[in-house]
Image: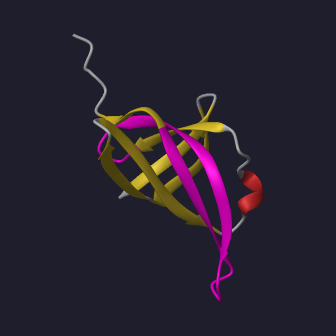
Amino acid sequence: MKANVTLNDSIVMSDVDVDIYTETRRGLKEWRGSFSVDDPSILSYDKYQLELADGSAGHIQITRKSIVSGARRTLIQFTGTGRPPQRPESKA
């Protein structure tokens, strides 16, 4: 799925292909995921906002950066903090 990665309301990366996984452990729902980038230096280990193309959003913490063998890209792995991405409630 496509997403934007933002920090302090500024877009850091746009239109990124993101994989998100959810699972339940000991009764708690956890979520994590990954995406790849050409230039990993634009991302630190800060907390970011992940805004999905469907309008949903959630907070992520970058947990790992690893070079994809032979692809000259870096895999960015993250853990979701708080609730998984959900569509924002409309303000009527």
Picture residue at 55% right of the left edge, 50% below the top? 78
Picture residue at 26% right of the left edge, 21% below the top? 89
Percent of width and height locating residue 51? 43, 41
Counting every numbered tag in the picture gives 0
Q: Is residue 73 above or below residue 15?
A: below
Q: Quadrant of residue 77?
A: bottom right
Which residue is most to the bottom? Answer: 70
Q: Is residue 29 above or below residue 75?
A: above
Along the horizontal axis of the image, is 16 left or right of 22? right
Along the horizontal axis of the image, is 54 left or right of 2? left
Instruction: Please say whether residue 9 is one of the residues in the magenta stretch.
Output: no
Which residue is most to the left? Answer: 92
Q: Quadrant of the C terminus?
A: top left
Percent of width and height locating residue 79? 51, 46
Q: Is residue 13 above or below residue 19?
A: above
Nearer-the-camera pick, 90 or 82: 82
Percent of width and height locating residue 88? 31, 26
User: What are the residue bounds of the magenta stretch?
Assistant: 52-80
Q: Main secondary structure of the magenta part?
A: strand
Nearer-the-camera pick, 29 or 17: 29
Instruction: Please say whether residue 79 is one of the residues in the magenta stretch.
Output: yes
Q: Quadrant of residue 7?
A: top right
Picture residue at 33% right of the left edge, 44% below the top? 25
Picture residue at 72% right of the left edge, 65% below the top? 39
Which residue is most to the front? Answer: 26
Nearer-the-camera pick, 38 or 85: 85
Which residue is most to the right? Answer: 41
